[in-house]
Amino acid sequence: MESGLFVIKNMVNETDASKVLDAIEHVWGLNKAEVHLSRNEAVFSFDKRMASLMDFKQAVIEAGYEINN
């Protein structure tokens, strides 16, 4: 399993956190995901044979959020 952590720029409330989590959960290969609004973080683990970090990044961006690198 691989792990990822994104700092989400424009996540300001629980609705945003839910949208980010939903976007991450729709990527094939996800094992576990959590979104922490207080830290503006999304933490997740995934099977690298099924998905890449870029797949998760793209899903968050397509949901309308920016990621700090």
Image: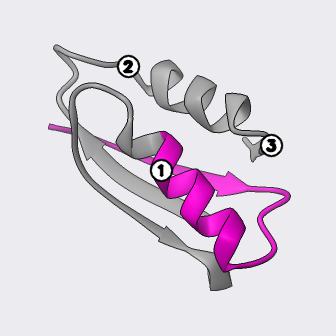
Q: Which residue is mark 2?
A: 52
Say whether disc 2 or disc 1 marks the residue closer to the N-terminus. 1
What SS does tag 2 mark? loop
3 is within the stretch colored magenta: yes
Residue 28: x, y in percent? 27, 25
Above-or-below relation of 52 to 46: above
The region drawn magenta spans 1-23
Considering the numbered disc 1 on the image, is that residue within a helix, a strand or a loop? helix
Q: Residue at x 65, y 85 (%)?
A: 38
CA–CA distance between discs 2 and 1?
17 Å
Q: Quick check: 4 left or right of 69?
A: left
Q: Amino acid at mark 3?
A: Glu
Q: Quadrant of residue 13?
A: bottom right
Mark nearer the viewer, 1 or 3: 1
Indicate the amino acid at tag 1: Asp
Relative side of 27 to 1, left or right: right
Q: Answer whether labels 2 and 1 touch (C-beta < 8 Å).
A: no
Q: Is residue 54 left or right of residue 32?
A: right
Q: Which residue is mark 1?
A: 22
**Residue at left offset 65%, top offset 78%:** 14
Which residue is labeled 3 in the image? 66
* Residue 16, x across and y down, in percent: 70, 64
> Can you tell which of label 2 and label 1 is closer to the viewer?
1
Residue in the picture at 56% in, 64% down: 18
Residue drawn at x 22%, y 21% is 48
In the rendered structure, which amino acid carries the disc numbered 2? Ser
| Residue 40 at x, y percent in the picture | 68, 70
Q: Where, by quadrant of the figure, is residue 34 drawn?
A: bottom left
Any part of residue 67 in sight: yes
Mark 1 vs 3: CB contact within 8 A: no
